[in-house]
């Protein structure tokens, strides 16, 4: 019977601790999700910058070709 009581006690302790563990895990997942979004935003900004650079370079080259054709 003493073993049964300690098992019951451990079960109660585990059930009481479970919400804390879930809250901690939810917090970690939330932080990781927010960091993931921030990384995606940064990557998107980098790609947009590269695209603008490429478009600018392309525009300059096109302009130079047109000038060359006029000569």
Image: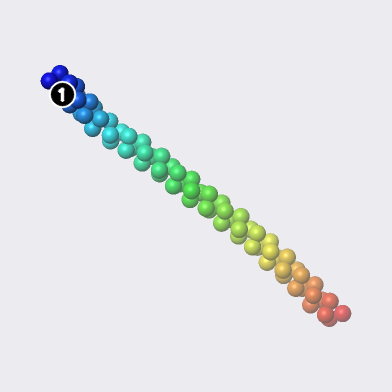
> Looking at this rendering, what residue extends furthest in the bottom direction?
70
The x and y percentages for residue 13 are 24, 27
Label 1 sits on residue = 4
The x and y percentages for residue 48 are 60, 60
The one of 58 and 67 positioned closer to us in this rendering: 58
Quadrant location, the C terminus:
bottom right
Q: Residue at x 15, y 18 (%)?
A: 2
To which quarter of the image does residue 12 belong?
top left
Whether residue 54 is visible here, answered yes or no, is yes
The coloring applied to the image is rainbow
The x and y percentages for residue 43 are 57, 53
Q: Residue at x 21, y 29 (%)?
A: 11
- In the picture, measured across the screen, residue 38 lies left or right of residue 9, that is right
Q: Residue at x 69, y 64 (%)?
A: 54
- In the picture, measured across the screen, residue 54 lies left or right of residue 20, that is right
Whether residue 16 is visible here, answered yes or no, is no
- In the picture, measured across the screen, residue 14 lies left or right of residue 53, that is left
């Amino acid at each position: 019977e003493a073993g049964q009581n300690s098992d019951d006690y451990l079960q109660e302790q585990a059930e009481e601790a479970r919400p804390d563990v879930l809250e901690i895990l939810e917090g970690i997942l939330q932080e990781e999700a927010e960091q993931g979004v921030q990384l995606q935003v940064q990557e998107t900004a980098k790609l947009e910058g590269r695209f603008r650079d490429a478009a600018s370079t392309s525009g300059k080259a096109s302009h130079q070709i047109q000038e060359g054709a006029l000569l």
